[in-house]
Each structure stands twice: as structure tokens, then as C-alpha cells.
Amino acid sequence: MWQKIYLWLDERLGLKEMYTGILDRPEPKGNWWNTLGSASLFLFILQAVTGIFLTVYYTPSPDHAYDSIQYIMTGVAFGWLVRGVHHWGATLMVLVVFIHLLRVFVTASYKYPRELTWLVGVGLFLMTLGMGFTGYLLPWNQKAFWATTVATQIAGSVPYLGDFILKVLRGGSDLSALTLQRFFAAHIWILPAILTGLIFVHLFLIIKHGESHFPQKED
């Protein structure tokens, strides 16, 4: 029965062709540096899963944000572990994506026909930084508050557009409840949506053009 269902779906969806094109395709010779892209994707999925768990208990308001984090850490079963994985996973994701981008640049894997793959990868790195930036404020403690104050002030020093950027980020002249709400919305909705879209485009381009061969030493 299951085989008949599979054949019925295969005729209409092309499951075998998708499997061959996506999963069962030859990989170029290389080393562990070639796995950084997959490692970045794994870390993104890990961040998404742990982030969903944290949103169940987190309250994005100045009066309750810090208390909700403390409750996650002390009152929720394994909450300390999930938050720890999410916290350090964010740092590790930025590091892995940066090293992956650096590897692509050093090995000149951004050249024809992979220019668009490179540009989308740069966009993924910027979105990853944005995720880290917006998530840093959410605990709403002294360290997060003043670090974000300095960071947004730096962004506000951009010539001509600085004042506009500052008001967009903060929702006003100073950090407030609106700032926390904007960072929370960007962290769990806006940036993840853009990041997910870019990941699908990135994977499509990798499947279409294949992965570049890692430079081999000449004998």
C-alpha cells in the first residue's frame, strides 16, 4: 500500500527527481571546510527550535522582560539549558557563518557562475548579525540596555540618515518599551522570515550551480 502511495505521489510531484537533485548528488573533493554551510544551517534550525520554546515564556515589556528571563532560568524545567543553547548558539552561528564566508572568499568560490550565491551569502551574514543585535536587548538588563544604547547611537551617527535610523531602531529618541517591542518583532518575525527566504534561494543556487572544488595541492 505504501509503495502505491509513493508511486502515486512520485508521478505527480517528482519525488525521485527531487531526491536525486537535492540529496543524492556528487560532492566535490574537499575537507572539513566544505561542511561550514551545513553547520550554519544546523545552527539556524537549532536557534529556531530553542527560540520558539523561549517565546512561550518570554514577555517583551520593560516591566516583565527581565523577570521572565529569570523565570526561564530558574522556574522552567531545563529552561536554563535551552536558554544557554540559544545564547551560545547565536554566538557560534555568527562565527561559523563568518568563517564560511571567509572560506568562500579565500578560495575564490564567488566567481562565475556563483556570483549570486556569494551575494545571497553576504545577505545571510548580515541577517545573522541583525539577529544577534536584536536578540541582545531582549533580556532587558543593564548590560543589554547600555550596550544597545551605544550600538544604536553609533548607527545614528551615519551622515544624513543617522537621525532617521536612530528613530527607526529606538522608536523615539531614547530606548523604551517601543524599542524592546520593535527588537522583539524583528528578532522573531522580520529577520527570521528574510533569513529563511535567503536560505532557500541560497540552497537553490547551490543545487543549480553545484559546489566549487576546494583547491587541491599539486603533486
Image (spheres, rainbow, N blue to C red):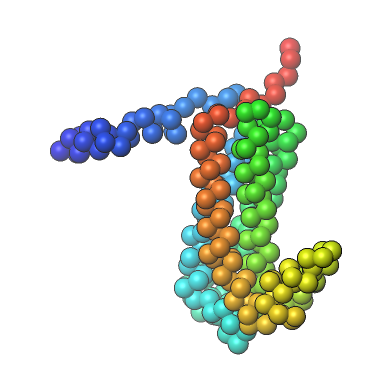
Q: Residue 152 location in percent, x, y? A: 76, 70
Extreme-left residue of the structure: 1
Q: Quadrant of the N terminus?
A: top left
Q: Residue 47 location in percent, x, y? A: 55, 58
Q: Residue 43 location in percent, x, y? A: 57, 51
Extreme-top residue of the structure: 219
Q: Nearer the viewer, residue 187 or 92?
A: 187
Q: Is residue 118 above or below residue 177?
A: above
Quarter where residue 184 is shown:
bottom right
- Which residue is drawn at the image coordinates 45% and 34% (left, top)? 22
Extreme-bottom residue of the structure: 63
Q: Is residue 141 above or below residue 159?
A: below
Answer yes or no: is residue 84 visible. no
From the viewer's perspective, is 97 left or right of 9?
A: right
Answer yes or no: is residue 53 visible. yes
Q: Quadrant of the C terminus?
A: top right
Q: Nearer the viewer, residue 163 or 74?
A: 163
From the viewer's perspective, is 143 left or right of 18?
A: right
Extreme-front residue of the structure: 160
- Which residue is drawn at the image coordinates 53% and 43% (left, top)? 201
Quarter where residue 17 is shown:
top left
The number of numbered badges drawn on the structure is 0
Q: Residue 110 location in percent, x, y? A: 68, 33
- Which residue is drawn at the image coordinates 69% and 50% (left, top)? 95
Q: Is residue 118 above or below residue 170?
A: above
- Which residue is drawn at the image coordinates 51% and 38% (left, top)? 204
Q: Nearer the viewer, residue 90 or 121?
A: 121
